[in-house]
Image (tube, grey):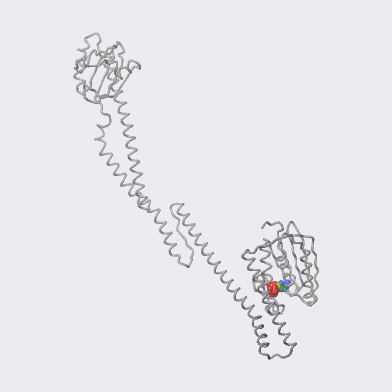
Amino acid sequence: MRKAIFQKFIQVVVAVLVLSSAIFYIAASSALLKNSRYDMMFTLRTLDGILDYSNDLEEEVDQLEEAVSSNHSRFTIIRTDGSVAADTERVDEKSLDNHLTREEVKEAIEEGEGYSRRYSDTQKKNMLYVAIPSESTDYILRMAIPYTGMSEYLVLLLPAVWLSFLVAIVYCALTADKFSQSITRPLKEISQEMLKVNGDYTDLSFETYQYPEINIIAETTTKMSKNVKDYLNQIEIERHIRQEFFSNASHELKTPITSVQGYAELLENGIVQDENQKMDFIRRIKKEAMNMTNIINDILMISKLETKEAEVVKSDVRMSIILDEILDSIKPLADSHQVTIHAECKPVCIHANGQQMTELLGNLLTNAVKYNKPGGQVWVTITGQDKNLIIRVKDNGMGIPQESIGRIFQRFYRVDKGRSKKQGGTGLGLSIVKHIVNFYHGTITVRSRLDAGTEFLINIPMEEKM
Ligand SMILES: Nc1ncnc2c1ncn2[C@@H]1O[C@H](COP(=O)(O)OP(=O)(O)OP(=O)(O)O)[C@@H](O)[C@H]1O
Ligand SMILES: [Mg+2]
């Protein structure tokens, strides 16, 4: 990159120098030509004033010969018919063309003054011609000088031009080197810092550089490293959650499996002879198998809701129907816990998955009954408010300790393992509820006081397009 910057710098400087020299040459040539023409015109007008046209013109012109020969110039007096009346150059008159065909003479007659540049066959040189009509007579006065333009000054100018080229290129080389360093150094620093990041993502920081564009790269790199760090932390957290989940899940499944194994072995060994006891063991095995199925179903449901890969079939779900079904199925549990349920449901209909709505309401109501006291009460109200489905489940049961409220939605979390176990809980119910609420972009809040009761409030937008 440094080399490329350097080369570009030199290329630009050389191009600029060549271009400016060419422009200077053209401008100087034109100025020189204009100046020469002006001087010649002035000389012609002076001569027109001095010349005595009543005398012999040849004699008059002869007097000028000495003056004009010093600078190799030529002075000609031309008649209006184009013939030469007098000339400082002694040329055979017949060998001269009619001068009316000469450009400068034609211009002088038509426009009052004329000039031209051409190669002179008589002088064998490039000449500059200027002509004017005499003010007092009909003659045309013409002056010619050898003219090479700027080329004769070029030799004088060349050393100065070369010197300025040299100075410019040396200066440019030094500047280019400094400039390229000011770009490549920060880039090198940034890449070196990035190379230091080796698995262990520490926060990167860079000084403020001279160019905003490089500062943007530095800022982006810092941001990127921060994002990667956050991302890795997130992966670590998720890995931890997964690990915890697997250990919890296997622990939860291990207990029923051990029981099933125990009962099966007892039956196999023939130790139990009593038919009633045998039937009891078989019932227990079936119950444990049912428990395991429930746990696995819950886990599958959560994982489907998490990955969102489940093809959720939605329809218009009438909440009163769902509630009635749940109340029917929960009645035996409520009766056994001596809990009364008060239900109130407005005619609301939500476009959702019926099974998910049943899971959501069922889990909340089962908890409200399970974690209650004999003689306790549960209030459930379902309403529609501002295009939101509002579900409120309240009980006056045992309540949740303050320090546990933040964790009850975690998978397998149970406030009191002993009391939950007694109720047959695995700590997946509220996690499912939370996942379903999130799936419908809703919110869930909980208020609870130990020994006073708990209230869950759910708000789900009913017109959310998913
Ligand atoms: N209404 C409630 N009153 C008091 N405690 C509650 C209430 N609802 C939930 N909890 C507490 O929160 C914990 C988590 O509830 P969650 O429904 O997730 O699990 P679970 O009821 O133990 O098991 P599962 O629902 O999977 O059968 C419970 O263990 C319970 O201690
Ligand atoms: Mg539960």
Horizontal side of residue 194 vs 391, given as left or right: left
Residue 289 visible in rendering:
yes
- Picture coordinates of residue 107 (x, y %)? 33, 18
Would residue 26 appear left or right of 349 to someone viewing this image? left
Q: In terms of image quadrants, where is residue 92?
A: top left
Among the 4 quarters of the image, the one containing residue 357: bottom right
* Residue 449 visible, this angle: no
Q: Looking at the picture, does residue 354 appear above or below residue 50?
A: below
Q: Which of 115 and 32 is in front in this view?
A: 115
* Drawn side of residue 110 relative to residue 301, left or right: left
Question: In this picture, is 229 found above or below 277?
Answer: above
Query: Where residue 162 appears, x then y in whole percent?
Result: 27, 41
x and y percent of residue 339 in the render?
79, 74
Whether 327 is drawn above or below 93: the answer is below
Quarter of the figure that contains the C terminus: bottom right
**Ligand 2 image position (quadrant):** bottom right
Residue 96 percent coordinates (x, y) = 23, 16
Q: Is 305 placed left or right of 190 in the picture?
A: right
Viewer-proximal residue among 391 and 25: 391
- Vertical placement of 212 versus 283: above or below? above
Residue 378 found in image quarter:
bottom right
Q: Residue lying furthest top in this view?
A: 54
